[in-house]
Image (cartoon, grey):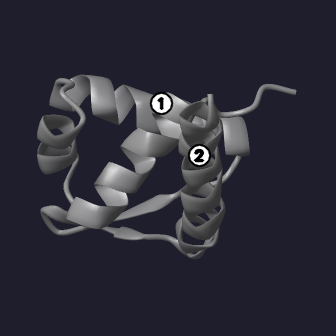
């Protein structure tokens, strides 16, 4: 089983916070297409749709909402672990 990496989760959270792949890309210093590809791979890894396309924008799916809390915890714990050393 493949697990999402921290970079994917940080990018996911940037998309969650900005509600935009383009703005998230600027926030994490990636291209918009790289962010889209990362989110597609994350969805494939989890086996669930994380985003709903609404007009020209995006919303979180129920599974995306559920992943958000876990992603925040994982990213925060990773940062805390690095800071401890």
**Number of marks:** 2
The residue that appears at 62% across and 27% down in the rendered structure is 85
Q: Residues within 10 Å of mark 2 (few under 14, many from 20)?
A: few
Q: Residue furthest right?
A: 1
Question: Which residue is denoted by mark 2 in the rendering?
Answer: 80
In this picture, residue 27 sits left or right of residue 5: left
- The x and y percentages for residue 28 are 24, 35
Location of residue 78 by image quarter: top right
**As rendered, which of 51 and 15 lies closer to the eye?**
15
**Dot 2: what SS?**
helix
Horizontally, residue 16 falls left or right of residue 79, namely left
Q: Residue at x 43, y 60 (%)?
A: 51
Rendered view: 38 above or below 52: above
Q: Which residue is mark 1?
A: 7
In this view, 41 is above or below 14: above
Q: Secondary structure at mark 1?
A: helix
| Residue 40 showing in the rendered view | no
Where, by quadrant of the figure, is residue 16 drawn? bottom left
| Front-lying residue, 67 or 55 | 67
């Amino acid at each position: 089983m493949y697990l999402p990496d921290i970079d994917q989760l940080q990018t996911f959270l940037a998309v969650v916070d900005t509600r935009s792949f383009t703005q998230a890309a600027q926030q994490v210093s990636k291209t918009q297409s790289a962010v889209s590809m990362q989110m597609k791979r994350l969805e494939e890894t989890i086996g669930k749709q994380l985003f709903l396309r609404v007009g020209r924008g995006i919303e979180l799916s129920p599974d995306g909402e559920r992943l958000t809390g876990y992603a925040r915890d994982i990213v925060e714990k990773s940062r805390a672990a690095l800071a401890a050393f």
